[in-house]
Image (tube, rainbow, N blue to C red):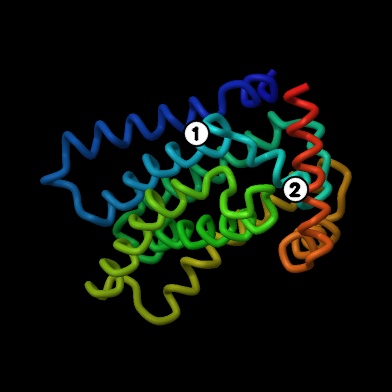
Amino acid sequence: MVETFMEKYSVWLTTILAAGAAVLLAATWETIPMTQKLPAMYMVALAVHEWEELKYPGGFVELAVNMTGVEIKNLGLAKLGLFAFTLWATVIPFIGHRVGWLVASTVLLGYIEALAHLAAARVSPGRFYSPGLVTALLVQLPVTVYGTWYLASNGLVVGVEWLWAFLFLVVPLFGTQAAIVKSNGQSYPEFVRNARRAVFTKEGRKETRRKQREQQEKQEG
């Protein structure tokens, strides 16, 4: 089934996408415009980031579950939704690179990733790290900052176009997130409340760290 395949191999699909982007960048660096290079570079950055989140060291899904209380019954379906969003956020801007705000939507994703992982680091047992934080800050964010500067300084995205870019990114992002949450039997408002409690209240952070430690002890035992 598709769900089983995605549960096992979604990270490899992202890696294949990134490998193709890397080969393309190496072969055409002198000829393709920066507006195509940016989404392609982000494909590579996103794959590296996903390996840290899910494999080395991994554990971001478990941390998110403990933060929000949502029990993921079908991880493969959730990964399918996230891979579909990856294609939306990178491949469409790559193809439509002549539309500056489409490229900007890819660029803006790095800010969301950095903020999300910094927030998650607040509730992890180590308090200074969440799976994916290193690549979010050292791989994704540099592409994002440079891309923002390039698009703005060259007048490729101006004024309200930044809003279009933001909406093009966040509507499907949070729509996918809400669909995943609902498919696992939790209301999205409850999901958001639990996440806020975990990040912004002392009790929520303590409870999430306790769950994380209990899970780690169970895995080690």
**Is residue 95 visible in this depiction of the protein?**
no
Q: Quadrant of residue 221?
A: top right
Where's residue 185, x and y in %? 88, 44
Q: What is the distance, in whole Å, between disc 1 and disc 2 at their CAs?
A: 24 Å
At horizontal 18% and vertical 48% (from top left) the residue drawn is 32
- The numbered mark at residue 179 is 2
How many numbered dots are placed on residues in this image? 2
Q: Residue furthest bottom?
A: 159
Q: Is residue 168 above or below residue 215?
A: below
Q: Nearer the viewer, residue 105 or 48?
A: 48
At horizontal 63% and vertical 48% (from top left) the residue drawn is 126
Q: Quadrant of residue 15?
A: top left
Where's residue 20, x and y in %? 33, 31
Q: Secondary structure at mark 2?
A: helix
- The numbered mark at residue 39 is none
**Is residue 168 visible in this depiction of the protein?**
yes
Where's residue 65, x and y in %? 76, 44
Q: Amino acid at mark 1?
A: Trp
Where's residue 80, x and y in %? 63, 34
- Image side of residue 169 versus residue 102, left or right: right
- Image side of residue 148 versus residue 121, left or right: left
Q: Quadrant of the N terminus?
A: top right
Q: Amino acid at mark 2?
A: Ala
Q: Secondary structure at mark 1?
A: helix
**Mark with earlier residue (1, 2):** 1
Q: Is residue 40 above or below residue 79?
A: below
Crowdedness near tag 2: few (<14), some (14–19) or many (≥20) residues, C-alpha within 10 Å: some
At horizontal 80% and vertical 56% (from top left) the residue drawn is 206
Question: Which residue position is annotated with label 1?
Answer: 51
Q: Is residue 39 above or below residue 28?
A: below
Crowdedness near tag 1: few (<14), some (14–19) or many (≥20) residues, C-alpha within 10 Å: some
At horizontal 28% and vertical 35% (from top left) the residue drawn is 22
